[in-house]
Amino acid sequence: MHIYFTILILLTVWVRMAQLQQGGPDEKEKTTALKDLLSRIDLDELMKKDEPPLEFPDTLEGFEYIFNEKGQLRHAKTGEPFVFNYREDLHRWNQKRYEALGEIITKYVYGLLEKECHLKKVTLPVDATESEPKSFIFMSEDALTNPDKLLVLIHGSGVVRAGQWARRLIINEDLDSGTQIPYIKRAVEEGYGVIVLNPNENYIEVEKTKAQVQLSSDSSDEPAEKRERKDKIQKETKKRRDFYEKYRNPQKEKETMQIYIRDNGSPEEHAVYVWDHFISQSAAENVFFVAHSYGGLAFVQLMIQREAEVKNKVTAVALTDSVHNVWHQEAGKTIREWMRENCCNWVSSSEPLDMAVESMLPDCPRVSAGTERHELTSWKSFPSIFRFFSEALEAKNSSVKPTPTRRSNRIKYEEL
């Protein structure tokens, strides 16, 4: 805790210096003495004693964690769950440690998709050159050749990547609730081909060169005199900010720039690209989507851009706590009508699973996912979604529409 007392003392010194600078020669002499005192304090050395280096293991073993037979993340020696506050009073360091573990989890899940689910990794763009940024998706061997059924999975926004619903669940709960693996395995068992999208892999980060940093700070069209005055003020401000920054962020990370992946620079772009190059080219007569959170918005945007194709090829869509908005996205009347007939949104709610939930939007039926936790909606609605797909397929073959909820609840929803 000594660092906080040090900061308090130094801040007091700064305030006193500012007061002295308003006075006469004696006060200015005192200010000079205080400046000399501050110059003798090595801030970097102080911080080295307080915040450990932001260097973390790059394997689960290095973190001393493993996934047990239940798919739960546990400490290899103690068997305890993951502890976020590994070091007291160092929230930033703990957060960086959590993020480093999260990156390892992402690679671990990629490995499970290939080894346990037998999916193959496919590079995007399909015609990418060796030097350009790339993304990828995962597909089953029969994804494009299965003549009957194809399941497409889209996760939400944030740090999650292909194969995940929620990183928090993987780390704090288990692999079943936090990953798409149960969906993939069941889909394969029931004869579906599978495509797993990767909508958050939109760019690569590269370190900025000094020239690029300088260019970004000097790109001003202001007159020279005005810019000089502004620069002088900015230098003084920067000097003060840097003084405090050495405490708040002693291990300042390098400045980076983002280079976007061609035709995959956003979740919406990615969904359209995968549709154009894979889903629309598949042999499957019946395509089914499961889209969580922002993935639902990406699906609606896909439908807006490829309405006729989607209507022709997609049999049913299961949304889980989707954040789409048919008004803001300007989805037309024909799209809204199609969604009412072919989509169902399992939302976070205190109601029992599959119970109808009232909606203010005129798009698709909303039913309870059986949980009030947003990130758990895909896992809790898992059995209901596959039942919904089976009913949709039967309804299509018999020209009768599927029942997204139990009959009594459906009547209740229609009355609403």
Image: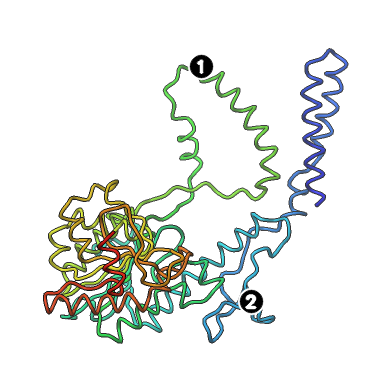
Q: Nearer the viewer, mark 1 or mark 2?
A: 2
Distance CA(mark 1)–CA(mark 2): 57 Å
Q: Is residue 176 visible?
A: yes
Which residue is located at x 44 percent, y 53 percent? 205
Residue situated in front as seen by the camera: 231 or 100: 100
Q: Which residue is mark 1?
A: 226
Left or right: residue 382 compared with residue 214: left
Q: Which mark is residue 64?
A: 2
What secondary structure is found at the residue carrying circle 1?
helix
What secondary structure is found at the residue carrying circle 2?
loop
Which of pointers 1 and 2 lies earlier in the amino acid sequence? 2
Residue count near mark 1 (Cα–Cα under 10 Å), binned few <14, some 14–19, many ≥20: few
The quadrant where residue 203 appears: bottom left
Q: Amino acid at mark 2?
A: Glu
| Residue 294 position within the rendered picture, expressed as x and y whole percent measured from the top left | 37, 57
The quadrant where residue 138 appears: bottom left
Which residue is located at x 45 percent, y 63 percent? 374
Whether residue 91 is situated above or below residue 189 in the rendered picture: above
Residue count near mark 2 (Cα–Cα under 10 Å), binned few <14, some 14–19, many ≥20: few
Q: Is residue 197 visible?
A: no
| Residue 196 position within the rendered picture, expressed as x and y whole percent measured from the top left | 32, 71
Q: Quadrant of the C terminus?
A: bottom left
Left or right: residue 360 compared with residue 370: left
How many circles with numbers are drawn on the protein?
2
| Residue 4 position within the rendered picture, expressed as x and y whole percent measured from the top left | 78, 46
Q: Which mark is residue 360?
A: none
Residue situated in front as seen by the camera: 367 or 270: 367
Q: Amino acid at mark 1?
A: Lys
| Residue 7 position within the rendered picture, expressed as x and y whole percent measured from the top left | 77, 41
